[in-house]
Amino acid sequence: MRSGPNVNTATGHAMAATKPNAAAPPRRKILIADHETGTTVPLKFLMEKSGYEVRVAANGNEALQLATAYKPDLVLLEAMIANPDGFELCQLIRENPELSATRIVFVSAMIRDVDIAKGMALGADGYIKKPFANAEIMDHVRKLLELNDGPDQ
């Protein structure tokens, strides 16, 4: 039996041709802005395992520079990062026209009602309290990134 690039050698049946990667949609980009490696390492692993491209920033200045250059689809943001803090960073991202479509979710240990209200008032798309469940954060991420895939995009 003839074996070629589109023939399964075990069965001899023709196989469907695979499409080149160029036809695949681009991977969604996520920026994690948090100073605690105890959060960033597992979050980065979880997001990459789910197929997202991920960058990590340990402070506000680094996060702002990365956001401007990397143009993430979503930022997972700790309110307690410094220089600037997460609330200021959220506001700076919202004020940047190039980042207007970027979704922002606070993932923070600052869990008082006033902190959550402040984050939402500054334009966050969600606020997840630490400690969080993987399923909870993945649910938020998927829903928000699906919004970016809507007909207006």
Image: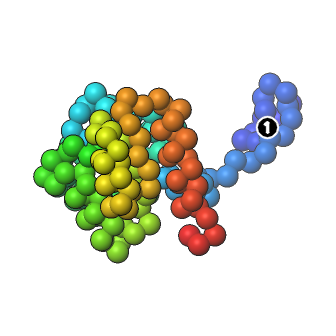
x and y, in percent, of residue 94 in the image: 33, 66
Q: Residue at x 54, y 61 (%)?
A: 148
In this view, the residue farthest toward the front is 113
Residue under the point 51% across and 35% down:
136
Q: Residue furthest top?
A: 10
Residue 94 versus residue 149: which sits nearer the camera?
A: 94
Quadrant assignment for the C terminus: bottom right
| Residue appearing at x 61%, y 65% in the figure | 150
Residue ranking furthest to the left = 83
Residue 76 in the image: state x and y as whole percent. 37, 46
Asked whether residue 109 appears in the rendered view, the answer is yes
| 63 lies left or right of 145 | left
- In terms of image quadrants, where is residue 128? top left
- Viewed as shown, does residue 54 lie left or right of 50? left
Quick one: SS at disc 1?
loop
Q: Is residue 35 above or below residue 98?
A: above
Q: Amino acid at mark 1?
A: Val
Q: Quadrant of residue 9?
A: top right
Residue closer to the observer: 71 or 138: 138
In the rendered view, tell whether residue 151 sits above or below residue 16. below
> Residue 115: horizontal and vertical position, in percent?
30, 47
Q: Residues within 10 Å of mark 1 (few under 14, many from 20)?
A: some
Residue at point 13%, 52% (across, down): 83
Q: How is the image coloured?
A: rainbow
Q: Quadrant of residue 2?
A: top right
The residue identified by callout 1 is 7
140 left or right of 71 in image: right
